[in-house]
Amino acid sequence: MTLSAALTTHHLAKSFGSTRAVQDVSLTVQAGETLALLGPSGCGKSTVLRMVAGLERPDTGRVEVGGRDVTALPPEARHIGLVFQDYALFPHLSVLDNVAYGPRMRGAARGEAHGRAQEALVLVNLPELAARKPAQLSGGQAQRVALARALATNSPLLLLDEPLSNLDERLRAELRNDLRELFRRVGAGVLLVTHDQREALALAGQVAVMRAGQLVQTGAARTVFDQPATAWVAAFLGWANVLGREGGQALLVPENAVRLGQGDIFTLISRHATEAGETVTVAHPLGPLTLNLSAREVGMIDGQTLRLAVAEARVREVMDDRQG
Ligand SMILES: Nc1ncnc2c1ncn2[C@@H]1O[C@H](COP(=O)(O)OP(=O)(O)OP(=O)(O)O)[C@@H](O)[C@H]1O
């Protein structure tokens, strides 16, 4: 028996007037796998998610959930767990009834729906808050309840749109760890939209990078972060050294290609103090190299110079698609 993917989109496209919000997006999320959709503001991430959820109708293309074509189905018939920012909790219902709402809508008897809701609240570590009203929850607790509501549907696919936004840094870090563990336990496919690279790396095994409505790179998260396919992807993912060349190419110099204290002596163009040490830019024949130095490494600066070697085997040349 071949297992169906939790989600497959086939050539999804959507325009709003003359804005081509999404063009030809095909992606797959396997059961038990988390895929993070990454890209700058306005690149079409939410529109992809909304088409998968059934909240937006694609102009062309298909959506399959668990091997079933759901393109023509309304959201409630798709069997997807949603955690969207604008999917607020019902203020007049208790936490338990909020979480039980999905199973109830799908025809579960009250007792069974409450049982599932209790289980979901245990999964997100909030079983003791079942009787509260949403107004009596902190921001982090409300996010967990929203997640429990999605989990209680027992859906094979969860969609999360910026699930940790609106939370302070401490809560984000805490929930990030919990979510990873939770996704692993429930075994659903998860499609996650985030603009936070750290969140993507922490939560998702797979990433898909979007630019101007199109997917530009998809693959294992570690591979995409370590081996961006183009200069634009590298710059978007926060690579410090994407050095333009003649002829539309660029060199990607990873931090681990730079060996301090060996090789030739280069002049520093700029220096800025950071919490950990300094960020410096070195005039190097490959181009201006920006390095994050620890306090110990700052001690290797001699006058306004630094001795370093670049391991050229670790430097990759890619297409420079940053313009346009
Ligand atoms: N209902 C709509 N009507 C008109 N244009 C829209 C609509 N929804 C989205 N757009 C446009 O489609 C493009 C993609 O928007 P989308 O919200 O999918 O981007 P996004 O990547 O999720 O952005 P962000 O990270 O800022 O949320 C944008 O240019 C946006 O202005």
Image (spheres, grey):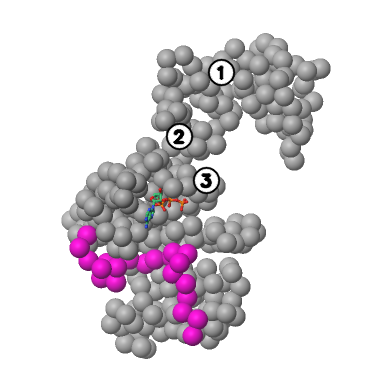
Q: Say which label, 3 or 1, has the lower sequence index.
A: 3
Q: Which residue is disc 2 drawn over?
A: 233
Would you say the beta carbon of the disc 1 residue lies within 8 angstroms of ligand 1? no
Q: Nearer the viewer, mark 2 or mark 1?
A: 2
The region drawn magenta spans 71-92
Q: Residue at x 62, y 15 (%)?
A: 284
* Pointer 2 with pointer 3, Cβ within 8 A: no
Q: Mark 1 = which residue?
A: 311
| Horizontal side of residue 20 vs 41, given as left or right | left
Which of 17 and 5 lies nearest the eye of the viewer? 17
Residue at position x 77%, y 30% from top?
Answer: 296
Please say if the residues under marks 3 and 1 sit with CB atoms less than 8 Å apart: no
Q: Earlier in the sequence, mark 2 or mark 1?
A: 2
Residue 231 lies, in percent from the top left, at 46, 28
Residue type at the position of mark 3: Gln
Crowding around mark 1 (Cα neighbors within 10 Å: few <14, some 14 to 19, many 20+) is few
CA gap, disc 2 and disc 1: 22 Å
**Can residue 22 be spotted in the picture?**
no
